[in-house]
Image (cartoon, grey):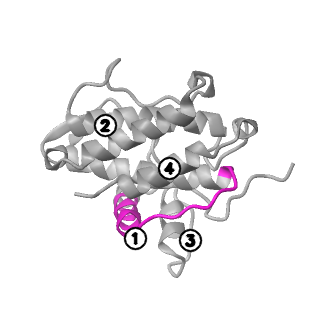
Amino acid sequence: MFDLEPATDVMASLVESVRDDQLTAPTPCPELTVGDLLDHIDGLSLAFTAAATKAPPAGGSQPPSTDAARLGTDWRTRIPQRLAALAGAWREEAAWHGMTQAGGLDLPADVAGAVAVDEIVVHGWDLAVATGQNFHSTPELLGAAYEFAKTSADHNPHGTPGLFGPPVTVPDSAPLLEQLLGLTGRDPQWVPAAT
């Protein structure tokens, strides 16, 4: 069981600081703009809150979308509120037990919790580097995300469609965040192209 609040607080602060002119900027996620990534974060917040409470999400369980056109005008307040609800839902002991659904899949609740940690930590980094902000994670959550990504990469060495791209080689001596990013198919040195 992990407290997701440190990661959701970081993500909420990042979201609130995104400028309108950055919504069309590229991210480390191929083919996703910052606006698309924000829509994904919004959707995964709802999906993993529903996974924690084991209540079917509105519209059924399906992978979160990635479409900036769906953001609306209140995203700077709505997404942080949904992130806070996500952290609160996973603070309950019952969230981590039994079976649940996320992204249209049935899975053990503790695995869904690990996926939620990974999604918030990794997409927090994505959003930070895409918008020129600082990123940090607690060692505990970074370690949990790393363990989940490592297990996934061990089982799917060429990537997991819809979750991770093919792993990027990162030196064993690299910081844990860089190793995590490499396991998820990201280049830890990624920066937006100069305009």
Judge depth for marks 2 and 3 and give the one in front. 2
User: Mark 4 and mark 3: span between their CA atoms?
Assistant: 25 Å
- Residue at x 48%, y 36% (from the top left corner): 79
Give the image quarter of residue 85: top left
Whether the residues at callouts 1 and 2 have beta carbons within 8 Å, the answer is: no
Where 127 sits versus 146, above or below?
above
User: Mark 1 and mark 2: span between their CA atoms?
Assistant: 23 Å
User: Mark 2 and mark 4: span between their CA atoms?
Assistant: 15 Å
Circle 3 residues within 10 Å: few <14, some 14–19, many ≥20: some
Counting residues from the start of the chain, the first of labels 3 and 1 encountered is 1
At label 2, the amino acid type is Thr
Q: What percent of the width, then of the height, locates residue 106? A: 23, 35
Q: Which residue is mark 2?
A: 49
Magenta residues span 130-150
Counting residues from the start of the chain, the first of labels 4 and 1 encountered is 4
Is residue 117 located in the magenta-colored stretch of the structure?
no
Magenta part mainly helix, strand or loop? helix
Q: What percent of the width, then of the height, locates residue 124? A: 52, 52
At label 1, the amino acid type is Pro
Q: Which residue is mark 4?
A: 11
Counting residues from the start of the chain, the first of labels 2 and 4 encountered is 4
User: Mark 4 and mark 1: span between their CA atoms?
Assistant: 16 Å
Q: Secondary structure at mark 3?
A: loop
Along the horizontal axis of the image, is 141 left or right of 54? right
At label 4, the amino acid type is Met
Quadrant location of the N terminus? bottom left
Along the horizontal axis of the image, is 127 left or right of 53? right
Quick one: 92 or 179, which is closer to the camera?
92
